[in-house]
Every structure is written in structure tokens, then in C-alpha cells.
Amino acid sequence: MFINVLGNWNGLSLEKLFKERWKAPKKLVHEWRMSKEVMLNGRTAIWSTILQQGDLLSIPLMDAAENETVQATNLDIPILYEDEWLLVANKPAGIDTHPSQPGDSHSLINGVAYYLQQTGQTCMIKHIHRLDKDTTGAVLFAKNRLIGSMLDRMLEEREIKRTYVALVEGTLHKKEGKINEKIGRDRHHATRRRVSPTGQTALTHYRVLNHDSKRNLTLISCTLESGRTHQIRVHFSHLNHPLAGDTLYGGKKTFHRQALHARKIEFTHPISEEKMAIEAPFLDKPEIFDGRNL
């Protein structure tokens, strides 16, 4: 993999770039050091070398073997953004992000593996976060171990912002607010979660976008400061405004699924350091969300 050294890296040694700026996994850095395959301007790199803008760095990132367990399935998954490091896919409803049981080959990652196969790419693929089976929208994937570890850390440190839109039942009287309620498992139901004082910290910020008085539904935008299972669904059910279509959490069967869509993902690209903002179009037919209202 070839990388043009950025001006922001001027004065960093190669070792400091890997260990301090990228915070690359120690095992991976050790592999690179032992293999002597890291190249700088066409020559075997000396790790104490100070980098300068315009230098050409080459690192070995052949992780295709890690994909051998992912079966490729043609699911016609829309790809919203892609470069040699990562991609963002638009997940449709009705499929899991990754196989939920042995032999399952109809998850989002199977569809993305098929896309990579068809485009002649032999890289690995790893999802950085998940969406519920019936939630649609943007999902971020890494194409190698280095970028995977960097994106995992960014997600943990809340440097990846995900914005959702949802339709909730009733009228929210506050135009914006936050729901700060811990979430834990519901011991009476295998898959359901609930607000619980002994659960994990969960904070949801929301903003009202529109209200459909005819159907008594409110369109909202949400961002999360945590990523608990079913977080948005649990929090709005707790407020007695369950998501439309979310029968698991008390919503009416207004739609064939809960009205929740991961609309946008924003982050700083770990390698190019560019600001990324990728939006996911709605996929439902018939439509659940009216794009004109957003």
C-alpha cells in the first residue's frame, strides 16, 4: 500500500508515525519491523528516519486470508463511498450486519464480500459498527488490519459521528433534548433491552424535524454518545414515544419495520486526514421517510 507523506507528519520519525500518530497495533508494527518490507522512497525504511511531505511510504497490507471465512453472496448492496482503505455501505432492511448463526450467508458483510470479489479486490473486510436487522443506512467497513484498528479506536473514543432519523409515535413537545438513561438486558425477553439503573450508560441527543399530524408521528434526528444495543428504540419507548413500526418496544405496526435509518456518518479519515461526511439515501419501497422533510 502506497501512502504520500502529509505535511502534518513533517518532523515525525517513521516509528512515531506508526506508534504515536496512528497507534497501530503492537503486533502489526512488530511484524513490519521484522519483515523489513516497509519502504520509504523505494528503499527499505530505517525506522528513525524523519518524514518529509512528498516522501512515498509503502507498507505491506495483504490481509485477504482473513476473508476466507466470509462467503460472498450477491445481495446488490449499494456502496456509498470507497477508497483503498475503507468503504461505507447502505444496509437494507431485513438482513443482519454480520451472520447471526453458522451457515448464514445473507448478511451485509456477505454482500460486501461479493462486491469486493466482483471488483477484483482481494483485501479483507471488517465491519466497524452494526445496525439492527431492520434498521437501514450507513455502515463503515475497514479493508485491512491497520485501518480496522484505527477505526475501532476512533469509534471507542467517539470520533465517529453517526446521525439517525426516526419516526416516533405522538408529539414531542421539546424541540430538542437528551435522554440519559442506562440500558440493560430485559430478563423476561431474550432479545429485548430496557432502561435499568444497573445497565450501561447510554446518552441519546435528539432534535425534532417535523410532525405529521395526520398520522400523529414525529420525525426526529438523533446522535448517540454511546452505542448500546437498540439504544434509540429503548430510549424513545421509555418516553412513551416508541418508534413507528417497532412492535418489540410497544410501537404500532404502522410500517413493516421500525422507522429508523442511519442517515449520515462523519469522521476524519485516519490516513488522508480529510473530513468525511457520507449520507445514505433511503431504500424503502414503499417509502417510510419523506426525504423532502429532512
Image (spheres, rainbow, N blue to C red):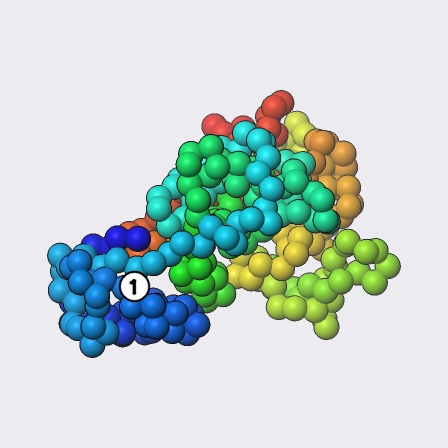
Asked if residue 77 can be seen in this view, the reply is yes
The picture places residue 209, in percent across and down from the top left corner, at 51, 40
The residue that appears at 70% across and 43% down in the rendered structure is 104
Considering only vertical position in the picture, is 242 above or below 213? below
The residue that appears at 48% across and 37% down in the rendered structure is 117
Q: Residue furthest right?
A: 188
Residue 247 lies left or right of residue 105; in this view the side is: right
In the image shown, does 80 or 266 lie closer to the viewer? 80
The picture places residue 248, in percent across and down from the top left corner, at 77, 46
The picture places residue 155, in percent across and down from the top left corner, at 48, 61
Residue 76 lies left or right of residue 61; in this view the side is: right
According to the picture, the residue beneath numbered tag 1 turns out to be: 37
Considering only vertical position in the picture, is 213 above or below 230? above
In the image shown, does 261 or 55 lie closer to the viewer? 55
In the image shown, does 94 or 37 lie closer to the viewer? 37
Q: Quadrant of residue 56?
A: bottom left
The residue that appears at 52% across and 41% down in the rendered structure is 113
The picture places residue 3, in percent across and down from the top left corner, at 25, 55
The residue that appears at 26% across and 53% down in the rendered structure is 2
Identify which amino acid the numbered label 1 is placed on.
Glu
Q: Residue furthest bottom?
A: 48
Residue 128 lies left or right of residue 121; in this view the side is: right
Asked if residue 210 can be seen in this view, the reply is no
Considering only vertical position in the picture, is 288 above or below 113? above
Q: Quadrant of residue 41?
A: bottom left
Q: Residue furthest front?
A: 35
- Number of marks drawn: 1
